[in-house]
Amino acid sequence: GAVVSQHPSWVICKSGTSVKIECRSLDFQATTMFWYRQFPKQSLMLMATSNEGSKATYEQGVEKDKFLINHASLTLSTLTVTSAHPEDSSFYICSAAGSGEKLFFGSGTQLSVL
Amino acid sequence: DAKTTQPPSMDCAEGRAANLPCNHSTISGNEYVYWYRQIHSQGPQYIIHGLKNNETNEMASLIITEDRKSSTLILPHATLRDTAVYYCIAGKGGNNRLAFGKGNQVVVIP
């Protein structure tokens, strides 16, 4: 099946720094990728839809200047958390559509901001 | 996307079939029923999806009612590794977003 690779798996950073998370579709091309975040014991919340070659579409309440999304190629989307603060600590998950109707997910990135 | 309703939690006996219900009474004609599961601190794993007909794969079976207002995911022989949060989602799939509900915390008991 289709594989979505996400890196890093976990990252610890100081408050005020920026963190970049990569999402790659390994064996298929993805014109659209999705970014979710998940707080402990809660469900996944869609943050934004990333479209190759165009601007991302953000969900209501998600700050586009804080969560920068770049989808420069058909196999790579990146999420940069700018000027991270402790409240940004969360589990971030990307997903991409393979052939047909299936959506495949990366393994997630646990971000801890000190 | 149509809203789905699942029980918040359920226990299943190891080795027995696990039947996970889901209601999606407002599903539209072009929306699929998807099932994913998430084991703690991992990304969601695709299980199965269907539109109208019942589906079966190596992981599970999906039974969709004729009116498509509800469905049941069947894990034929539950194992301890099937303990996870199971999400039933109604959506168009492909390049369309999938919105997750609260899911069903399934615990397989020895």
Image: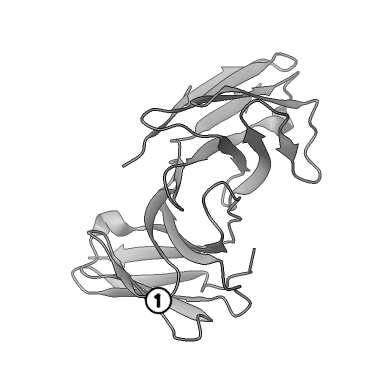
- Using the image, name the chain to which the residue with label 1 belongs: B
Please state which amino acid type lies under the numbered disc 1. Answer: Thr
**Please, which colouring scheme is shown?**
one colour
Whether B12 is drawn above or below B48: the answer is: below
- Judge from the rendering whether residue B54 lies leftward or rightward of residue A88; answer left or right: left
Decide which of B1, A36 is in the foreground and name it.
Answer: B1
Task: Name the residue located 57 percent from the left edge and 73 percent from the top edge.
Answer: B29
Dot 1, crowdedness within 10 Å: few (<14), some or many (≥20)? some
User: The C terminus of chain B lies in which quarter of the figure?
Assistant: bottom left
Location of residue B78 in the rendering, given as x and y in whole percent from the top left corner: 24, 66
Decide which of B58, B52 is in the foreground and name it.
Answer: B52
- Judge from the rendering whether residue B77 lies leftward or rightward of residue A93; answer left or right: left
- Judge from the rendering whether residue A82 lies leftward or rightward of residue A100; answer left or right: right
Location of residue B69 in the rendering, given as x and y in whole percent from the top left corner: 53, 81
Location of residue B58 in the rendering, given as x and y in whole percent from the top left corner: 22, 59
Task: Name the residue located 58 percent from the left edge and 70 percent from the top edge.
Answer: B4
SS at mark 1 in the image: strand
Task: Name the residue located 61 percent from the left edge and 35 percent from the top edge.
Answer: A90
The residue where tag 1 is placed is: B72
- Judge from the rendering whether residue B89 lies leftward or rightward of residue B86; answer left or right: right
